[in-house]
Each structure stands twice: as structure tokens, then as C-alpha cells.
Amino acid sequence: MTRQTPTIRHARLALEQVAAELDQTAFRGGYLTSERMRFLATKVRDAFQVYDDAVESAAPAD
């Protein structure tokens, strides 16, 4: 099975999932393990990279 190239839509979904998990954790008064925080941070960085790549590819060439 081939892996899809992430798109802006995938990045937005990933960020929404991270936000939802943080909201749920805060609402329950819970906590995240350091492993889970690193996982969420990686999702945010990956989403940022997709966004950054999209912005660069849309920029006019000089």
C-alpha cells in the first residue's frame, strides 16, 4: 500500500485532532504523558511542514 502525500487538508485535520485532544484533556482535568506530548508536537511540526511546503510552492518564482 502506498502512502499518500500529505495535503493542506491533512494538515488541518491533524491540527484539529491535536486541538481536540488538548481540549478534552483540559476539560477532564487530566494530563498527558511526555510521550503523548512529543507525539502531538510531532503532528504539529509535520502539519507545519506541509503548510510551509504549500506556501513555498505557491510563491511566484523570481
Image: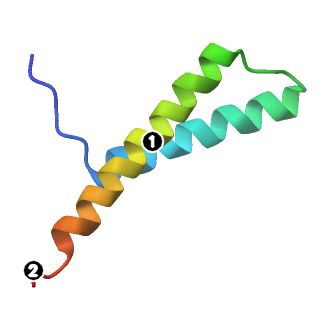
Return the mark for residue 61. Answer: 2
Quadrant of the drawing holding the N terminus: top left
Q: Give the image location of residue 32, x and y in percent.
A: 73, 20
Left or right side of 35 for 4: left
Q: Give the image location of residue 45, x and y in percent.
A: 45, 42
Nearer to me, 21 or 38 = 38
Point 53% across, 23% down: residue: 39
Rendered image quadrant of residue 27: top right
| Label 2: which secondary element | loop
| Residue occupied by mark 1 | 45
Point 90% across, 26% down: residue: 29
Label 1 neighbour load within 10 Å: few <14, some 14-19, many 20+: some
Q: How many marks?
A: 2
Three-letter code for the amino acid on which mark 1 is drawn: Arg
Left or right side of 6 for 27: right
Rendered image quadrant of residue 22: top right
Q: Give the image location of residue 62, x and y in percent.
A: 10, 85
Above/below status of 54 relative to 21: below
| Label 1: which secondary element | helix
Label 2 neighbour load within 10 Å: few <14, some 14-19, many 20+: few
Rendered image quadrant of residue 14: top left
Instruction: Give the CA distance from mark 1 to mark 2.
Output: 25 Å
Point 16% across, 34% down: residue: 4
Nearer to me, 24 or 47 = 47
Point 57% across, 24% down: residue: 38
Q: Which is nearer the N-term, disc 1 or disc 2?
A: 1
Above/below status of 30 relative to 58: above
Three-letter code for the amino acid on which mark 2 is drawn: Ala
The type of colouring in the image is rainbow
Left or right side of 24 for 29: right
Residue lying farthest to the front in this orientation: 62
Q: Give the image location of residue 6, x and y in percent.
A: 25, 42
